[in-house]
Image: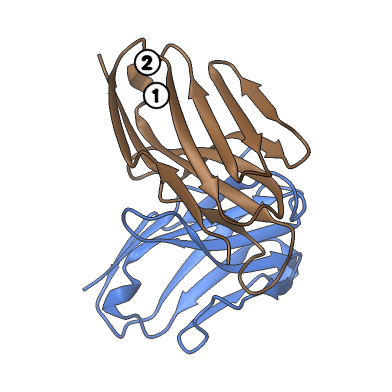
Chain colours: A blue, B brown
Amino acid sequence: EAGVVQSPRYKIIEKKQPVAFWCNPISGHNTLYWYLQNLGQGPELLIRYENEEAVDDSQLPKDRFSAERLKGVDSTLKIQPAELGDSAVYLCASSLTSYNEQFFGPGTRLTVL
Amino acid sequence: KQEVTQIPAALSVPEGENLVLNCSFTDSAIYNLQWFRQDPGKGLTSLLLIQSSQREQTSGRLNASLDKSSGRSTLYIAASQPGDSATYLCAVKGLYSGGGADGLTFGKGTHLIIQP
């Protein structure tokens, strides 16, 4: 069974440029999460989706970050414009429901120059 | 707001030793607790999930315990091997939703090195 797929694995951009990350969750998983992980820290939740509905986006900086999960499967996280402080690893996770075990993708490592 | 602390932050032991990693959380209103390992430059691999009603879970050489009332969990690794070297993260799922609490709340992890 395929795990959570993310792309790209690495991205280097200059500040003020836009960037997008893509996630394909495990088949059949209704709940999808985006987390941010800074160096030496544990991941922190950005947004949770139940199918195509964003049910908790309170930690998402909405002035520059946006996310969507069309058709309740794949999801895209976008930053526009990127700032130096956005350099981090962006992790996608999915679970059968919000109370089941979460499975993580390999992450996208973003470097903003 | 839930806070998760992991002790020690780093640990280096010779191969073959049994070891214990500690995790504490401030709010006992949790639904479950998950232990992960993270290899350098990689995502998180789920090791064990303990529901709040459970006391422990076992998988191979790994055993995780949960004392919800005291806000503590331990991960026991038996007969450690060099391949166990990684960062181990503890995370809790709260009972209540919203306000950023819908996901897992993570500790900073324990960086483990097993010397051959």
Quick check: can you spot residue B95?
Answer: yes
From what the image shows, is residue B108 above or below residue B18?
below
Marks 1 and 2: in contact by CB < 8 Å?
Answer: yes
From what the image shows, is residue A33 above or below residue A29?
below
Residue sitting at 56 percent across and 56 percent down?
A: B105
Towards the viewer: B116 or A90:
B116
| Residue denoted by label 2 | B81
In the rendering, at what x and y percent does residue A21 appear? 47, 66
Towards the viewer: A87 or A3:
A87
Residue farthest to the front, as pictured: B70
Residue sitting at 35 percent across and 73 percent down?
A: A86
- The answer to whether A35 appears left or right of B39 in the picture is right
Residue B84: which numbered mark, if any? Answer: 1
| Quarter location, residue A59 | bottom right
- The answer to whether A101 appears left or right of A112 in the picture is right
Alpha carbons under labels 2 and 1: distance apart: 5 Å
- The answer to whether A109 appears left or right of B53 in the picture is left
- Which quadrant does the C terminus of chain A fall into? bottom left
- Which quadrant does the N terminus of chain A fall into? top right
Residue farthest to the left, as pictured: A113
| Quarter location, residue A12 | bottom left
Tag 1, which chain?
A: B
Residue sitting at 51 percent across and 23 percent down?
A: B76
